[in-house]
Image (tube, rainbow, N blue to C red):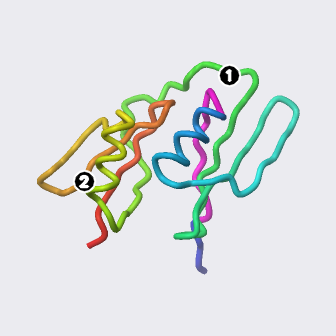
Amino acid sequence: MKFKMVHENYNVSNLEESLTFYEKALGLKEKRRKNGEGFIIVYIGNEESDFELELTWLEEHPQKYNLGECEFHLAFQTENHEAAHRLHEEMGCICYENPKMGIYFIQDPDGYWLEVVPKR
């Protein structure tokens, strides 16, 4: 039996702010949207992969979510690590760097950590 990963979900407190962040920081654009009673789900992605990030906004939860110790993350690989680092530095979203490993992490508006790794 085989399984294919298709998406990961992040609940967000401000959908428009999150969509703006993910497009600017990682080039992820809206692929489709589901509007329901009290919720909106937006799937974002790019042409590099068919994997999607599902952003869920709940009307009854406008505050940021408690992410605990944030001991989880989603990783993104880039061919131009230096340019990506400059962009994220300008955006002020770098939250941790490990120069020895050649990686760094950015943080989205809700506090989710996203790892940025160079193509090796």
Residue at 52% x, 70% y: name it.
48
Above or below, 48 against 109 in this view is: below
How many numbered badges does the structure rendering display?
2
> Foreground: 71 or 57?
57
Q: Which residue is mark 2?
A: 103
Above or below, 116 against 56 in this view is: below
Whether the magenta-drawn stretch holds residue 14 is answered as: yes
Residue at 58% x, 63% y: name it.
46
Above or below, 13 against 112 in this view is: above
What x and y, as percent, mark residue 95? 30, 35
Q: Which residues are magenta?
A: 6-15
- Left or right: where 116 falls relative to 17: left
What x and y, as percent, mark residue 116? 34, 54
The C terminus: image quadrant? bottom left
What x and y, as percent, mark residue 103? 24, 54
Can you tell which mark lies on residue 93?
A: none
Q: Residues within 10 Å of mark 2 (few under 14, many from 20)?
A: some
**Looking at numbered disc 1 in the image, what kind of residue is underneath it?**
His
Q: Residues within 10 Å of mark 1 (few under 14, many from 20)?
A: some
Q: Secondary structure at mark 1?
A: loop
Q: Which residue is mark 1?
A: 61
Q: Earlier in the sequence, mark 2 or mark 1?
A: 1
- Left or right: where 52 falls relative to 25: right
The N terminus: image quadrant? bottom right
**Looking at numbered disc 2 in the image, what kind of residue is underneath it?**
Ile
In space, the residues marked 2 and 1 are separated at their CA atoms by 33 Å
Residue at 58% x, 37% y: name it.
18
Specify the quadrant of the image occupied by residue 17.
top right
What x and y, as percent, mark residue 44? 63, 53
> Foreground: 82 or 14?
82
Whether the magenta-drawn stretch holds residue 13 is answered as: yes
- Between label 2 and label 1, give the one nearer the viewer: 2
